[in-house]
Image (tube, grey):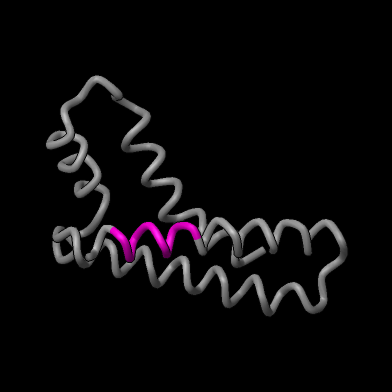
Amino acid sequence: MIGLLALAVPVFIWIVTFSSNPALPQEEKVEKYLSFFPSFLHSPRSISVTALIFAGASIFLSTIGRRKADDTFKVLSVAAIVVASAIILLQLFTML
């Protein structure tokens, strides 16, 4: 369950930013996205690293939580691992 919470941070910010005003140009969406973070995280690379850390923590915590979970939480843990893995792959691709 904690893994899902760690995963929710980057996903929630991304969804809120890009779905709230779809008509905005990309530059304004990026400015709005950066406004959610403290001033020391206002570079795209530092935000990508933060998203990587949260997604990695989600994978780690979901893997640990799967050991003692019932069937419902095992399915949620697998879903969290899959989504976090996709986020990591996308973040690494954008950092190239």
How many marks the image carries: the answer is 0
User: On screen, 30 above or below 2?
Assistant: above
For the point 17% across and 34% down, which residue is it? Answer: 26
Residue 20 location in percent, x, y? Answer: 34, 27
Task: Judge from the rendering whether residue 75 lies leftward or rightward of residue 45; answer left or right.
Answer: right
Residue 43: percent from left, percent from top: 14, 60
Q: Name the quarter where the C terminus is drawn.
A: bottom left
Left or right? Give the position of 33 relative to 11.
Answer: left
State the image coordinates of residue 52 (x, y, percent, origin top left).
38, 68
Task: Give how far across and how far down residue 63 sits, in percent.
Answer: 66, 76
Specify whether residue 87 is painted magenta: yes
**Magenta-highlighted residues:** 86-93
Q: Is residue 14 magenta?
A: no
Q: Name the image quarter holding the N terminus.
A: bottom right
Is 35 on the left or on the right of 53, as rendered? Answer: left
Q: Please, is residue 29 above or below residue 45 in the view?
A: above
What residue is rendered at 69% in x and 62% in y?
A: 78
Residue sitting nearer the eye, 83 or 38: 83
- Which SS does the magenta portion mostly show? helix
Q: Nearer the viewer, residue 39 or 96?
A: 96
Q: Quadrant of residue 88?
A: bottom left
Q: Residue at the right extreme?
A: 70
For this orientation, the residue located farthest to the top is 23
Residue at point 82% right, 77% down? Answer: 68
